[in-house]
Amino acid sequence: MHSLSSPAQLALKLVFMALGMVGSLGAQDDDGAIPRPMREETFEALMANPPFTRSLGFSDSIILTGVAKFDQDTFATLMDTKTMESQIVSKTPNREGWQLIGVGGHPARTETWIAKIQIRGGEIVSIRYQKPPPRPPKSGTSGKGGSTSGGGNLPAISDKQVSEAKAAAVNYKDGFLADGYPDKPPPEMVSKLSRLSTSQREEINRTMFGHRNQGLGLDARRQIYEGLVERAIQRR
């Protein structure tokens, strides 16, 4: 009979330990040479904040500030708290090459929200929700009112913005404040808008006012506006 401290017996115990089967060896075989299995609570910190979903080269200043759904499409708003710049990510890679892989958390508890983002190069990182730092008030922007934007978790829009969204759906060639263009939309966008119904354009416009009230800049609003229009065309 081999000694319990022989290399073969030691190797066998290591295999059992890796498979979670150390207990099957029996108390009489425990000679103290092998550490006892660690308890599950030992790993709670790692399970809550695993290192495998973080990028060492990814800025810790990036936070998740919002999640919105438009029909079957999901959008996440990210903010760099150092520059106060925001951008939108979705299943379509944005200009930075970032793509939304999925979102998690309880819908009614924003502090649990988390977005998995694939950044340029294929690496996937997890970004948690944080309350965005205060912004200086912007003239002409109202985050209050009884009308909703129709965009999920976006801020409410005012009655005036509801009227503007409706008017812009009819006069779509002129553009409106929330579309992300500094002036009228370019001809190719006008052509796409002409393929949508007035009600479709109005719904998109309401959503865009919600994003404007959220504090997104022109570039970020233009990205999501063009994405919403493109997806609306595809569903026709």
Image (tube, rainbow, N blue to C red):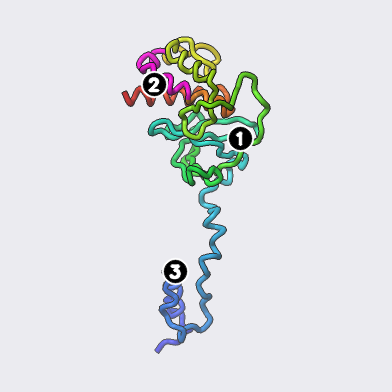
Queried whether the magenta region covers residue 232, the answer comes back as: no
In the rendered structure, the answer to whether residue 223 lies left or right of residue 63 reads left
Q: Is most of the magenta stretch helix, strand or loop? A: helix
Disc nearest the viewer among 2 and 1: 2
Question: Tag on residue 18?
Answer: 3
In the rendered structure, the answer to whether residue 67 lies left or right of residue 231 reads right
Residue at the outermost bottom position: 1
Residue 220 in the image: state x and y as whole percent. 53, 26
Q: Quadrant of the C terminus?
A: top left
Element type at mark 3: helix
Check disc 1 and give the amino acid type.
Answer: Asp
Residue 151 in the image: state x and y as whole percent. 47, 30
Question: Tag on residue 200?
Answer: 2
Q: Quadrant of the N terminus?
A: bottom left
User: Residue drawn at (35%, 16%), measured in percent from left and top?
Assistant: 195
Residue 205 seen in the figure? yes
Question: Tag on residue 80?
Answer: 1
Q: Is residue 195 above or below residue 68?
A: above
Please state which of residues 162 and 82 is positioned toward the viewer in this rendering: 162
Mark positioned earlier in the residue sequence (3 or 1): 3
Residue 220 seen in the figure? no
Check disc 2 and give the amino acid type.
Answer: Gln
Mark positioned earlier in the residue sequence (2 or 3): 3
Mark positioned earlier in the residue sequence (2 or 1): 1
Disc nearest the viewer among 3 and 1: 1
Quarter of the image where one finds residue 233: top left
Queried whether the magenta region covers residue 203, the answer comes back as: yes
Residue 150 in the image: state x and y as whole percent. 46, 28
Instruction: Report the magenta residues as a range.
Output: 190-206
